Amino acid sequence: MRGVIVPLVTPFNEDYSIDLQALEEHINYLQKAGVHGIFINATTGEFTSLSFEEKKFLAEKGRELVTSTFYLVGTASTNTFEVIKLTKHAQDIGADYVVIAPPYYCLLSDEALFNHYSLVAEKTDIPIILYNIPS
């Protein structure tokens, strides 16, 4: 995979529900523009503010809408077991890749970080892209 990969924003309605019409319009626009990949549940999509169910819902809707390019799903969480569940879900719906940032809000040792990613890789069967967010 190479080229332009676009991390999506998550559009919301005024009542904070997900704006599906805006999501569809945005994804369709990007596909017509010829991007090489679309990445849902990214940091630009406020994934830390989404519930587990909202992350799954967005991943499913994105999979329905992304038809002409690579589809990447962010599955990061502070909880390794939630990452595994989200990664399995992305795999089950047919995502091409998952993108996993390190657990946030806590500083992990190199060994703990290695164990986190290793456990996810052992429990799933989808290509994983490690997403470094230096801060």
Image (cartoon, rainbow, N blue to C red):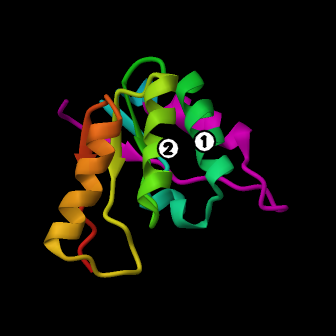
- Alpha carbons under labels 2 and 1: distance apart: 7 Å
Which region shows up in magenta?
1-30
- Which disc, if any, is residue 86? 2
The answer to whether mark 2 and mark 1 are in CB contact below 8 A is: yes
Q: Residue furthest top?
A: 68
Quadrant housing the N terminus: top left
Please state which of the two labelled residues, at mark 2 or mark 1, is closer to the viewer.
2
Give me the residue at 37% from left, 23% from top: 69
Residue 52 visible, this orientation: yes
Give x and y (percent) for residue 73: 43, 41
Give me the residue at 35% from left, 27% from top: 96
Residue indicated by mark 1 = 56
Residue 130 visible, this orientation: no
Q: Secondary structure at mark 2?
A: helix
Give me the residue at 60% from left, 66% from top: 49
Q: Earlier in the sequence, mark 2 or mark 1?
A: 1
Q: Is residue 28 left or right of residue 103?
A: right
Give x and y (percent) for residue 63: 53, 27
Q: Secondary structure at mark 1?
A: helix
Give x and y (percent) for residue 38: 40, 37
36 and 64: which one is in front? Answer: 64
Give, as a three-letter code, the residue at label 1.
Lys
